[in-house]
Image (cartoon, helix red, strand yellow):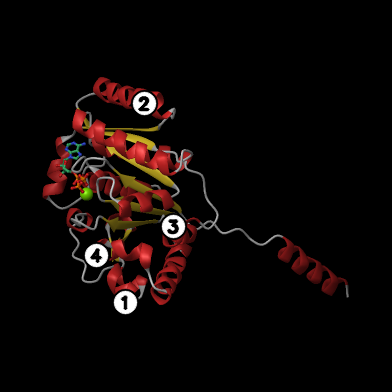
Amino acid sequence: MTDQASRLRALAQGQQAPKTYFHGRVVAITSGKGGVGKTNVVAGLAISLARMGQRVVVMDADFGLANLDILLGLSPQYTLEHVLRGEKLLEEILLDGPMGIRIIPASSGIQELTRLDTMAELRLVQGLQRVAETSDWLLIDTAAGIHDSVVKLLMAAQEVILVTTPEPTSLVDAYAMVKVLHLRDPEKEVWLLVNNGQNLDEAEETIGQLQAAVQRFLGKQLKVLGVIPSDPHILQSVRQQHSVADLYPTSPSGQAFQALAKQIKAQVPLQADGIPSFWRNLTTEDS
Ligand SMILES: Nc1ncnc2c1ncn2[C@@H]1O[C@H](COP(=O)(O)OP(=O)(O)OP(=O)(O)O)[C@@H](O)[C@H]1O
Ligand SMILES: [Mg+2]
């Protein structure tokens, strides 16, 4: 009798306070200008997070030139397009990368994501729900520039990392990206990552210049994530179709990626239902 009563009480309490699920933190990595190191950052960060015991899924959302797979020496047979057409399950297109990271080769299906029919959306959301059960992070490698499909991805993501180099052209394009996101939602926060600087002074100057412009013209402050130094080990790794974080973890950039992974893990909060709500945001965005 008492047993039954306490079981009923426990059940009722369970119903009043449904369990909260944390389905992965969603971070999109982008840049204003192309070729500034996004794909290397995504791979380096993913591998460094995995080395810390985190379960990471990476989505290649660069619909122009898919190069995440090339960087990691993988050759996808199927992409998200096959999932959307109902020919494959999401789990069947996932590729296994270094340190247990998993890759969603999405490039050729990504443009369709904001105008899916009901069946395709259901396939995608159900697949992602299952993948999300076993993921702590979804990292997204986007195309460069302020194309509408990229901006939609960035608006739907929990966090945005904007990569720039110290070059003036990269800085100007990074500012343009911040402005576009700010105009969509003034509350949207952006993390800044300076890549390929010759030294810390140069990187700090870059951060200062961009912060000054963003503050002056948009009344906004970027969150600074860190700096990845210019490092010949990166080119050496790319040539061998590996990430520097995998091949040379103790090189200057390999260590910087470890620091970056620690920083992001500490700073980015867990979000209830993270990956599924990212997809809901993306597929229901109407602007
Ligand atoms: N920190 C660094 N030190 C030295 N070289 C670097 C560094 N970061 C990137 N590179 C070089 O820049 C090249 C471009 O990097 P990556 O492909 O990651 O850029 P991207 O932003 O993804 O380009 P895209 O816009 O074409 O997708 C790399 O192949 C590498 O040679
Ligand atoms: Mg790239």
For image coordinates 35% across by 75% down, the residue present is 89
Q: Mark number for residue 252?
A: none
Mark 1 or mark 2: which comes first in sequence? 1
Across and down, in percent, residue 67 comes to: 19, 55
Of 233 and 269, which appears nearest the observer? 269
Instruction: Say what amino acid the circle numbered 4 marks.
Output: Ser
Across and down, in percent, residue 250 comes to: 25, 38
Residue topped by disc 1: 85
Residue topped by disc 2: 211
Across and down, in percent, residue 167 comes to: 19, 29
From this view, report whether residue 262 is shown above or below residue 78: above
Instruction: Say what amino acid the circle numbered 3 marks.
Output: Glu
For marks 4 and 1, give the CA distance: 12 Å
Residue topped by disc 3: 285
For marks 1 and 3, give the CA distance: 21 Å
For marks 3 and 4, give the CA distance: 20 Å
CB within 8 Å, label 3 to label 2 = no
Across and down, in percent, residue 69 comes to: 21, 58
Q: Circle 3 sits in a helix, a strand or a loop, which is it?
A: loop
Instruction: Say what amino acid the circle numbered 2 marks.
Output: Gln
Q: Mark number for residue 108?
A: 4
For image coordinates 83% across by 74% down, the residue present is 4
Mark 3 or mark 2: which comes first in sequence? 2
Instruction: Say what amino acid the circle numbered 1 marks.
Output: Arg
For marks 2 and 4, give the CA distance: 35 Å
CB within 8 Å, label 4 to label 1 = no
For image coordinates 47% across by 42% down, the residue present is 268
